[in-house]
Image (cartoon, grey):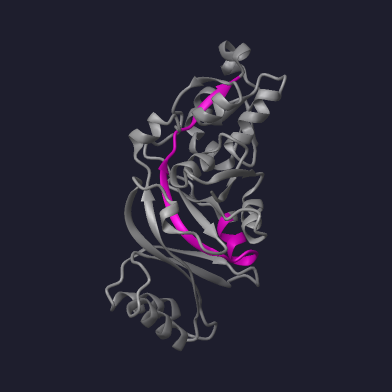
């Protein structure tokens, strides 16, 4: 049995994703996403599961930036899971949930529930925590009448009562989580009956500063080879205004012809090219999620 780090504490969506994809690994919780990634680099855990992108709120920038600027390692797999947010409170306050003075949760979770909060808890302060599970833990230990937004596992873990279910603004909410490794992680570590849909190769590309139309040339290198891109995103290089690198998701497994050809063509243009991982992508069946109570 190996070890997998996840954004904690217990009851987080990330823990649920880690358990679903790596059911035979021992889970170890960490307070922040950088702590999870550092734990892999320092060989405290064999791999880590961290959130990368939410369908409603977009990329989790701290994951991308820390992976690029601080602890470079390989993406070993991806799992996409549906996300359901619930409002929870201590049992003794359940009849006074509309009078809560503050709502605690991760910034993405609060953003996913803005409509509900505006309509029902408009006078409550919004307080951000490092994870939804941390919000539930905090509320369970507080004496004030406050609420958390989290999942059903967190409610059970910390003895809270769900007073409003599925309060997220959109019913197609989902999050992409990635598995990061610093060494070998066998593919057979992943859940056998998980739905493996496709493979992706994630590339980081920097553009030459003195090449007109460089981004167009980058995209052309994929286009004429008929390689499909599922995502392209820019992030600041942190070296000055206007300096960016691009993260590109390619919808195929790294091969010996097409992707190496792209890399050589881009390098010839003066671009920096690095492959962050070529990995299987899994989706988490909604019915299985609900049967496991992870919603």
Q: Position of residue 125 (x, y in %)?
A: 65, 30
- x then y, percent, for residue 219: 37, 75
Residue, far right: 143
From where the camera sits, is residue 248 visible? yes
Q: Which quarter of the figure is the C terminus placed in? A: top left
Residues drawn in magenta: 63-89
Above or below, 47 against 11 in this view is: below
In this rendering, the count of numbered labels is: 0
Kindly identify the residue that appears in the image at 27 percent across and 73 percent down: 226
> Left or right of 233: which side holds 147?
right
Query: Is residue 295 rendered magenta in the image?
Result: no
| Spot occupied by residue 23 in the image (x, y as percentages of width and height) | 47, 43
- Outermost residue on the front side: it is 1
In this view, the residue in front, 273 or 168, is 273
Q: Is residue 161 above or below residue 204?
A: above
Residue beneath the point at 60% across and 21% down: 159
Q: Image check: 42 left or right of 73?
A: right
Of residues 176 and 95, the one nearer the viewer is 176
Nearer the observer, 177 or 205: 177
65 up-or-down from 97: above or below: below
Magenta stretch holds residue 67: yes
Q: Nearer the viewer, residue 21 or 11?
A: 21
Q: Residue at x 45, y 24 (%)?
A: 165
Q: Residue at x 67, y 44 (%)?
A: 31
Q: In the figure, is residue 114 to the left or right of 146?
A: left
The quadrant in which residue 39 appears is bottom right
Q: Residue furthest bottom?
A: 268
Residue 175 in sight in this render: no
């Amino acid at each position: 049995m190996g070890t997998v780090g996840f954004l904690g504490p217990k009851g987080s969506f990330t823990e649920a994703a880690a358990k679903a994809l790596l059911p035979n690994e021992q889970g170890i919780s960490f307070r922040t996403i950088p702590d999870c990634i550092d734990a892999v680099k320092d060989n405290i855990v064999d791999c880590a599961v961290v959130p990368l992108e939410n369908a409603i709120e977009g990329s989790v920038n701290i994951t991308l930036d820390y992976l690029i600027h601080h602890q470079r390692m390989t993406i070993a797999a991806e799992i996409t899971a549906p996300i359901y947010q619930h409002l929870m409170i201590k049992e003794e306050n359940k009849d006074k949930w509309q009078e809560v003075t503050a709502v605690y949760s991760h910034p993405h979770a609060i953003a996913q529930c803005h409509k509900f909060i505006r309509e029902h808890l408009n006078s409550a302060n919004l307080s951000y925590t490092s994870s939804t599970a941390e919000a539930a833990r905090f509320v369970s230990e507080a004496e004030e009448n406050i609420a958390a937004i989290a999942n059903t596992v967190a409610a059970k873990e910390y003895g809270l009562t769900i007073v409003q279910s599925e309060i997220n603004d959109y019913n197609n909410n989902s999050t992409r989580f990635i598995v990061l490794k610093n060494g070998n992680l066998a593919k057979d570590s992943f859940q056998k009956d998980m739905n493996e849909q496709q493979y992706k190769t994630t590339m980081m590309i920097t553009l030459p500063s003195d090449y007109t139309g460089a981004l167009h040339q980058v995209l052309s290198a994929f286009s004429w080879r008929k390689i499909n891109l599922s995502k392209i995103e820019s992030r600041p290089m942190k070296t000055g205004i206007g300096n960016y690198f691009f993260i590109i998701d390619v919808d195929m497994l790294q091969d010996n012809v097409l992707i190496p050809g792209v890399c050589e063509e881009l390098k010839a243009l003066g671009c920096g090219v690095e492959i962050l991982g070529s990995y299987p992508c899994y989706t988490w069946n909604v019915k299985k999620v609900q049967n496991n109570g992870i919603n």
